[in-house]
Image (cartoon, rainbow, N blue to C red):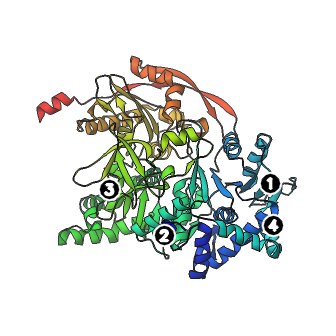
Amino acid sequence: MSQSSQATGGLASIPALLQRNATLFAEKDAYREKEFGIWQSWTWAETEKEIEALALGLINVGVNEGDFIAIIGRNRPYFYWAMVAAQSIGAVPVPVYNDSSAEEMAYILGHCGARFVIAEDQEQVDKVIDIQDQLHQFEHMIYVDPRGMRKYDHHQLHEYSHIQDQGRAAYDEWIVDLKERRAKLTYDSTCVMLYTSGTTGKPKGVVLSNRNIVESAKNASEFDNLRADDEILAYLPMAWVGDFIFSLGQAYWTGFCVNCPESPETMMTDLREIGPTYYFAPPRVFETQLTNVMIRMEDAGKFKYKMFHHFMEHAKRVGPNILDGKPVGFMDRLKYKLGDFLVYGPLKDTLGFGRVRVGYTAGEAIGPEIFEFYRSLGINLKQLYGQTEATVFITVQPDGEVRADTVGVPAPDVEIKIADNGEIFYRSPGTFVEYYKNPESTASTKDAEGWVATGDAGFFEEQSGHLRIIDRAKDVGKMADGAMFAPKFVENKLKFYPDILEAVLFGNGKDRCVAFINIDLTAVGNWAERNNVAYASYQELAGHPRVLDTIQEHVEAVNKSVAADPMLSGCQIHRFLVLHKELDADDGEMTRTRKVRRVIVENKFSDLIEGLYDGSPQVSTETEVTYEDGRKGAIKATLDLRDAAIVSTASKVAAE
């Protein structure tokens, strides 16, 4: 047994943690799922039996040790059980984004050579059937939801509950095999394979071992004092490493309860009902919630509107200090308490954050103003910096040292070094084993000593020891005059505004920067409704002169803010346009985790970039789009290109 495994009490796998929890927390809820408006729950003892039945059924249907089992569905207990059942019999679970196209699924299932697929419903089954002629190793598919499946050929198609029933019936036949397979699992056994989002090319299969998952879950749980009585809401994609570590790794380490919403549409209602104590969301979720709050306040009466803004101003001034235990005057505390009773408390309950002890955001940088808004309400929201290859955790923010402009200090047992070119390297117990079937990429990412290249540029602050991220190392460049070009810095400032959903900055090697902007249809649509502005589509609203005027105000405000940073003042936006369509993962412009694929966007809209640089007042363009049913089409548009006022840094320095 390895030294690390001894440190975790010999619990060297997720199935081993399940066995412990089934005894230690036998009658405590492990999972809840809302179905038909009613919460159903399973204790840890019941969960262990559900997983055992599935594991026996999988052995019965022919799953061998080392087989890959693809899992396609939204967050449901059945799929978390499927992952642990696969691990229990020595197979490797491969969760797949459930909104992936058939083509994207074909690549992943073919690359890992999945013999078995566990899918949610008819929609996912149909996708796999459409591509099965490309999958030479595929043999059996198991589905959870039987609706619409009656007339399918069931020779290779099985209902999830039937596989469990077969497992229970074959208990005496296979239980010894199950126990033997489970006993073989070590810290070095593969726990899961997760595919990267493929920002710059084909997704890579990241192999994570039991050591990676268990050690990372243990360290992070102890860092934030997570407990068995904590509650989380599992709503983020199961194929994403964050959900795997929070909803499976940490859940099994601490024994806390995982709550699964009824559907994406009811997620916010379910969030309010559960009131999680531990919560994670990418910046986009926090941005959307803040946008919805601001929209509602615009519609509120004058008294409510004034009261909200009055107390929020006070909260921004003293809330974060109170949260961090810093000294705050008696009268300020009293006023904050009144604000908590009248505004902050009800607002937190409405958002579902009334009980949050620890909240995290990661994935990309969050706007400082958005971050401070939530902390001012008394929500212990923190940033972490991580990657799939690190099993999430590279840096974390200790309580009392939470800031919007840094990502904290190295996580427990993580070492970090900064290369001469500013690139960040780390090594830790969470460092991935390899990229599956890709030794070249593995070698170029992880060296012989275990140091992993993150691809991000940053530096440590001398006084605080906190890490600051500048941008993706490959995206950080130089303007024609040698000034630094860091697009994410400017894009995040733009995305603070509720009516801006996405922004993409260009300017590397150029004499000035230009930008594409996507409006937020919810926020701008609400404004249009209040102001009697008629529109028939996103495209029409995005090109409305009053919308363009508002976006121009935002761009120019951001320019003033950027000009104040001597290192990045060259990144001010000289010209911009509002795109005629939303950037979309189905069109290849974003990853499934909502990260912009810059190279694809740059190539696809090269005519628009050319127009921004050559001074054209308008550009007519035609763009291919993918509809929900997979059909291709094209949309035509004539876009207005606008100039934005620039703050001269020379005159600013002179004025100072």
Please name the amino acid that badge 1 sits on: His
> Label 2 vs label 1: CA separation?
39 Å
Identity of the amino acid at label 2? Gly
Tag shown at residue 275:
2
Instruction: Residue 324 in the image: state x and y as whole percent.
Output: 28, 66
Label 4 crowd (10 A; few <14 / some 14-19 / many >=20)? some
Q: Earlier in the sequence, mark 3 or mark 1?
A: 1
Residue 93 location, quadrant? bottom right
Q: Earlier in the sequence, mark 3 or mark 2?
A: 2
Whether residue 35 is visible: no
Q: Is 296 displayed left or right of 535 in the figure?
A: left
Q: Which mark is residue 372?
A: 3
Residue at 69% across / 39% down in the picture? 103
Q: Secondary structure at mark 2?
A: loop
Residue 280 in percent (x, y) is at: 47, 60
Q: Where on the picture, by quarter, is residue 319?
A: bottom left
Q: Which mark is residue 162?
A: 4
Q: Assign the C terminus to one quadrant of the image.
A: top left
4 vs 1, front mark? 1
Residue density around tag 3, few if under 14, some if 14–19, many if 20 or more, within 10 Å: many
Give the residue at mark 1.
140
Residue 276 % position (x, y): 48, 69
Q: Is 489 placed above or below 214 here? A: above
Q: From the viewer's side, name the closer residue of 188 and 207.
A: 188
Alpha carbon of mark 4 to alpha carbon of mark 2: how far? 34 Å
Q: Amino acid at mark 3?
A: Glu
